[in-house]
Every structure is written in structure tokens, then in C-alpha cells.
Amino acid sequence: MDQQLQQEGYFGEFGGSFVPPELQEVLHYLSEQFYKFKEDPEFKEELRYYLSEYVGRENPLTYAERLTKAWGGPKIYLKREDLNHTGAHKINNAIGQILLAKRMGAKRIIAETGAGQHGVATATACAMFNMDCVIYMGAEDTRRQALNVFRMELLGATVVPVHNGQGRLKDAVDEALGDLVRNYKNTFYLLGSAVGPHPFPTMVKHFQAIISEESKRQIVEKEGRLPDAVVACTGGGSNAIGAFAHYIDEPGVRLIGVEPDQAPSLTQGVPSMIHGFKCLVLLDEEGQPKKTYSIAAGLDYPGIGPEHSHMKVTGRAEYATVTNEEVLEAFQELSRTEGIIPALESAHAIAYAKKLAPTMGQDQLIIVNLSGRGDKDVEQVYSMLK
């Protein structure tokens, strides 16, 4: 890909930055600072320190022996983002961006959250670095993820329920962007997914690429070669782009994103604008972003990251859907088989890996990115199963 185009935030036809002029100035400055610090030795060393001593990286690439036997196909490996501090991949990006915000002199941090894991990670980072923290969360999601709301408030964040629209992730992003437009002079928007206007998708990918950086080294150490497939769930796309990043230039590795069948942005979306960038978007009859639903609040978004959109249309990555029933079955199967309770988001990837396994040989390898743990979801799943 042309380096200059990528630096300007385009992945083929997707990406870009379509925001009011005053906000464009802020994003241009953010981009300058990001490219300045991301290769700065002192910044990299501080990031490494916190990822190791605070987040708990590197995390294991666990061979799921019983799951492999149960499915009777390729070896299944789980990249254990569930073992990170705060319980998901979101903390990787939160720590990276908070260190950038600190260097830019920010005192007030805002963020959006769906399942609550990015909100918790942001609130955690703000508590550690003593910054004011405001989290926008759809009102419906505050109900579904009440435990995470309490965790954020316990960490000192102000959680603002968003009642507009469906009261879900898209609406939380709307409110956060509105806050940034009003308060850009003193506010840093710590965006949690690989979406939004440039430089956000590029920044999030940079901080989440640690996932595939580790897994690529780990699988070679364990098996002497690269995997045949990497599977990850996709909502906005941050854990998936992190899990794919270091394999994108390895054509022998299949990259497979898995989304809810009720929010199939990549399998049914069309090129359009949402939240200041161009990507594949689910549109209704009037050309507006479609109402979506997923039992996993973190996947409930009508768009997707621009790089995922690009990889979909070019064929570099594959994208598939699973049903709520398949997800609930996978949630329970991983729990019983490996003693790991996954997040509902991660259970989407497990559900598809189960369908993929019979099509592959026993000499092949699948890495499933286990993006988070299921503590936040057990009450919701209990209610659904009962």
C-alpha cells in the first residue's frame, strides 16, 4: 500500500477524515503527535514498561487440547487477551493513547464504550495517570452491562448514558464526537475501536498490533511455522486488526473476521460515510445507518474499520457471520471444555472456528483471538439460558 496514502488515513477507497474544519485541525495535530512519538525511544520504552508491569503482557498462546480433540480437526490455539489487566484487549490501546495524551498535555479524557471493556480500560488508565474521565455509553448498554458501569464509576469515571437513537454503541460514538467538537481545546478523545476519522484507525491498529506481534513469534516457537488461519470477532474491528496486523503480508495465512448475523457490516455493508470516515456500512431504506442488534454489546455497530473494509473488497481477509444460538453454545463449550469463560464477543470467534475446523486437516493450525473474558456477560447469559 502507498505509504503516503496510508499516512493520510486511506486504505484503498476507505478511511479518510470528514469532520468540521475546527475538528480537522485538532485531528491533524493529533496525527502529527502520534507519528512523532510512536517511534520515539523514550515513548516506546514507557509503553513497553506499562504493557509488561501493569497490563501483564506478554500473555500466553494456549494450546486448547480438549477443544482440538472435541472438534477433531486442526490444532486450536487461543491468544489469551482475556488474561490482560481489566480482562480484554482494550487496555493495550488505552495505555498507548493515554501515554500520548500525557505528552500532549491533556487533562480531560473522553471515550465511548459498548460492552464496557474499553470504558473500564480507559477509566483504569485515567485513574493511574490522574486524569478526568468521561465515558459515553448507550443507555441500553448501561442496562446490559451494569457491572461494567459500576467498575468505571469505582475507578473515578463519569459514565454518561446516551438515550438518543437505539441507545447503543453508535449513539455513544455520536455523543463522544460531539463532546470533542465542543471541547477540543482541552480534551483528548481516547477512541476504543479501529474506526473514526484519521488518525484513529491507524493509532488503534498500532497499539493493538502487539497481539499478532506476540502470537506470530509464539506459534513459530511452538510449532515451527505460521498458522493456517487466524480468527477474531469484528464489531468496530480493533481486536481483529490487532490479531491480523503482523500476518497481513503473509499470504499463506487466512484472516477471518466473525460478526453477528444481526450486525453484518462486512458481509452485507456498502461503501458509505459514518462518524467522519468511509467504510462498509449497513444502511436502511432511507440511506441512514441501519439499526443493529447483537447479544454482544461490543459488536453492535453498523460500520467497521476502514482497513477491514479494504481487506474485504480486496479479498485479503474473509468475513463470516454466526447466530446468537451458535454464540451461546460456543460460550458454554469453551467454558466446559477448557475452563475458560469467554466474552460474548470472543465467543463469536469460537463459534466460527468450530464450523471452520471440520474443513481443515489435523496437520493444520488455527489461532483464535480470545479478545476478552466473560465475567461481564455471565449474568446476561444466565438470564438468556433460563
Image (spheres, grey):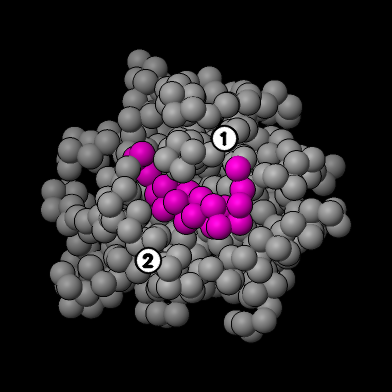
Number of numbered callouts drawn: 2
Against 94, residue 382 (above or below) is above
Q: Residue 164's image quarter?
A: top right
Residue at 65 percent across and 35 percent down: it is: 172
Residue 71: give x, y in percent of width and height: 21, 52
Secondary structure category for the residue under label 2: helix
Mark 1 residue element: strand
Q: Position of residue 213 (x, y in %)?
A: 35, 69
Residue 317: x and y in percent read 50, 68
**Splitting the image into 4 quarters, where does residue 315 fall?**
bottom right
Name the residue located 18 percent from the left edge and 66 percent from the top edge.
Answer: 362
* Amino acid type shown at disc 1: Cys
Q: Quadrant of the C terminus?
A: top left
Q: Measured from the top left, where is residue 97 in percent x and y?
A: 52, 54
Left of 332 or right of it: where is 165?
Answer: right
Q: Residues within 10 Å of mark 1 (few under 14, many from 20)?
A: many
287 vs 357, left or right, is: right
Q: Which residue is at a point 82% across and 46% down the rendered structure image? A: 287
**Span highlighted in magenta in the image:** 86-107
Residue beneath disc 2: 45
Q: Is residue 293 among what the camera can see?
A: no
Task: Tell me the chief SS of the magenta region.
Answer: helix
Q: Which mark is residue 246?
A: none
The residue that mark 1 highlights is: 133
Please tell me which residue lies in front, 339 or 265. 339
Residue 241 or 203: which is nearer the viewer?
Answer: 203
CA–CA distance in space, label 2 to label 1: 25 Å
